[in-house]
Image: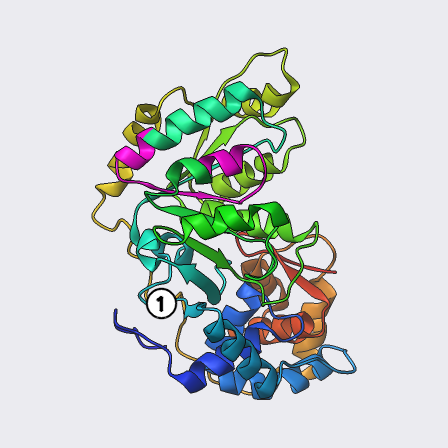
């Protein structure tokens, strides 16, 4: 697609089409982007979905209906929730830079918080008194320096981070829908953040968060931020997933050191051994991220969210499809390798991958590799 101006805003019809596409079966953020790039728009992509699924080997594909999308938009409007598209003014620019940024996020609260530089702070749900105290000290210092704080609204460290930043700009990233807060006892905490902060989610209203939704949510916490601070994390803590995602996204990773005798410090001490920046005060974080903020292209995401001109050409030929299929396996392979080894064009390879994806037979991995499911 041609460059979309900074004032880019979806029309009502486009917003319905975008919502229908991202809510359709087997369409995630990376697939959404690939479909838009291939077909030139959400409506054309929606029209192509049944054929893609059929050619990929699926009997059918569930497509979100216009009525379903309109109901979700109206339910969100009644609750004061905006559905913000990637490229629009209220969409977080750091998040838009990630390769699996959601095309639409639901936003409640004060959108201005999303324009502030953000530091994410996460950690143990079973936090110690010392862990909560250092969280309060770090957050207070970061807020004073002009940063918003992002976290996951969980018990323990997350809750301490949100409470301390409630008046300055606190961003709660939800694993479920905006009306399905987890844990439920933090609904009042969330409400207290909204005058100065915000709640965001990529999930539809009514979505009860499941175990697998939390790692998916964690990439949004790290994606929003310049850096992620881990305060107390056991060896297999979900916070370590956030740290790994942050590193993959090119974000700074910070960790608060703890006693080697405390199991809650095992994960954070391990991160420091692996190269995370040790933190004992807010200045440790600010000194690392300030040079990033001074870079001339800081915060300048591609306003169109990485969308390109639609690719010309028809469906792949049967022999092209067969060559590409023969190269795929459960082991991830890069698209460049598929193009080279199949001796077909990038357009044809991408078309076959879309067919398999919509049929539920292909998975895209961070950085671009694909594998059969």
Range of residues picked out in magenta: 141-161
Which x, y percent locates residue 18?
Answer: 49, 77
Observer-nearest residue: 298 or 284? 284
Residue 345 relative to residue 108: left or right: right
**Magenta-colored stretch includes residue 238:** no
Which image quarter holds the C terminus? bottom right
**Magenta-colored stretch includes residue 160:** yes
Rendering quarter of residue 368: bottom right
Which x, y percent locates residue 31?
Answer: 57, 68
Which x, y percent locates residue 17?
Answer: 50, 82
On screen, 197 above or below 8? Answer: above
Which x, y percent locates residue 59?
Answer: 79, 82
Which residue is painted at 28% across and 56% down in the image? 300
Which residue is painted at 27% across and 49% down in the image? 298
Q: How many marks?
A: 1
Which image quarter holds the N terminus? bottom left
Residue 350 relative to residue 87: left or right: right
> Can residue 356 be seen at all in this image of the molecule?
yes
Rendering quarter of residue 293: top left
Which residue in the protein does label 1 denote? 87
SS under mark 1 = loop
Which residue is painted at 55% across and 40% down in the image? 242
Observer-nearest residue: 281 or 367? 281
Colouring method of the image: rainbow
On screen, 158 above or below 233? Answer: below
> Can residue 344 be seen at all in this image of the molecule?
no
Rendering quarter of residue 165: top left
> Within 10 angstroms of label 1, few (less than 14), some, or many (20 or more) residues?
many
Residue that sits furthest to the right in the current view: 59
């Amino acid at each position: 697609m041609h460059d979309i101006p900074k004032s880019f805003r979806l029309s009502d019809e486009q917003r319905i089409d975008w919502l229908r596409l991202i809510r359709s079966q087997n369409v995630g953020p990376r697939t959404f982007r690939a479909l838009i790039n291939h077909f030139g728009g959400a409506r054309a992509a929606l029209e192509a979905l049944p054929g893609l699924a059929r050619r990929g080997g699926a009997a059918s594909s569930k497509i979100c209906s216009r009525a379903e999308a309109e109901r979700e938009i109206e339910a969100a409007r009644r609750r004061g929730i905006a559905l913000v598209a990637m490229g629009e003014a209220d969409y977080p620019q750091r998040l838009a830079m990630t390769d699996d940024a959601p095309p639409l996020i639901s936003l409640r609260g004060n959108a201005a918080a999303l324009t502030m530089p953000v530091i994410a702070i996460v950690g143990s749900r079973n936090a110690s008194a010392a862990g909560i105290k250092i969280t309060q000290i770090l957050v207070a210092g970061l807020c004073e320096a002009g940063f918003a704080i992002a976290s996951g609204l969980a018990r323990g460290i997350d809750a301490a981070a949100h409470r301390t930043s409630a008046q300055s700009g606190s961003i709660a990233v939800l694993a479920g829908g905006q009306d399905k807060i987890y844990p439920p006892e933090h609904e009042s905490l969330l409400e207290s953040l909204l005058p100065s902060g915000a709640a965001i989610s990529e999930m539809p209203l009514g979505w009860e968060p499941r175990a697998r939704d939390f790692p998916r949510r964690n990439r949004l916490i790290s994606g929003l931020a310049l850096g992620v601070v881990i305060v107390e994390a056991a060896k297999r803590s979900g916070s370590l997933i956030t740290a790994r995602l942050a590193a993959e996204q090119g974000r700074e990773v910070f960790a608060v050191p703890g006693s080697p005798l405390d199991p809650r410090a095992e994960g954070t001490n391990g991160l420091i051994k692996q190269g995370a920046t040790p933190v004992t005060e807010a200045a440790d974080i600010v000194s690392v991220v300030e040079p990033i903020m001074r870079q001339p292209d800081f915060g300048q995401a591609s306003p169109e969210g990485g969308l390109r001109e639609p690719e010309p050409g028809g469906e792949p030929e049967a022999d092209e499809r067969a060559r590409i299929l023969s190269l795929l396996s459960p082991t991830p392979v890069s698209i460049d390798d598929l193009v080279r080894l199949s001796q077909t064009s990038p357009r044809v390879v991408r078309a076959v991958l879309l067919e398999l994806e919509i049929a539920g037979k292909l998975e895209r991995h961070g950085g671009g590799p694909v594998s059969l499911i």
